[in-house]
Image: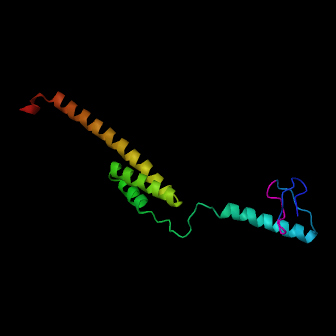
Amino acid sequence: MYCKNCGKELKEDDAFCSSCGTAVNGSSNNDENASQKTADYYTNQIYNEPNRNTNKSSFNTFSIVGFVLAFFSGILGLIFSILGYNQAKREGTPTGLALAGIIISIITIILAIVLVIVFMNALYYYIATNPDFYV
């Protein structure tokens, strides 16, 4: 059997031409089967992501460690969160925890820099206003 639109050879149970998408003529029973097959095909395309590995768990140690360290050590949190993000992307698992760790690490690093600047200014002001500081 061949497609009436483009001439491509069709399988016996095809409801639509795989080349141009034209519906294959048939009985009303075939039309129902064709509609069901099309619905099943698109449902599988939407819900069964080809890159997602369903055999592996979404447990990503680097992401968890990076997220926790982000609150205490910005640099270590950033390193582990980036490692966790890369691992999650490679495995096809969720990357949300790793992204949160990266963002919190960056905020922690910025706050640490601001605190060092404020502390240095306060120390400089204290030394400048107390001449007997070195005595």
Q: Is residue 42 above or below residue 78?
A: below
Residue 5, given in percent of the width and then of the height, sits at: 89, 53
Residue 68, given in percent of the width and then of the height, sits at: 38, 58
Which corner quadrant of the image does residue 52 belong to?
bottom right
Type of colouring: rainbow
Q: Is residue 121 above or below residue 91?
A: above
Residue bounds of the magenta highlight: 11-19
Q: Nearer the viewer, residue 65 or 127?
A: 65
The residue located at (29%, 36%) in the rendering is 118
Task: Tell me the chief SS of the magenta region.
Answer: loop
Q: Nearer the viewer, residue 88 or 135?
A: 88
> In screen coordinates, is 7 left or right of 39?
right
The residue located at (78%, 64%) in the rendering is 39
Quarter holding the N terminus?
bottom right
> In screen coordinates, is 123 left or right of 93?
left
The residue located at (87%, 55%) in the rendering is 7
Q: Nearer the viewer, residue 105 or 85?
A: 85
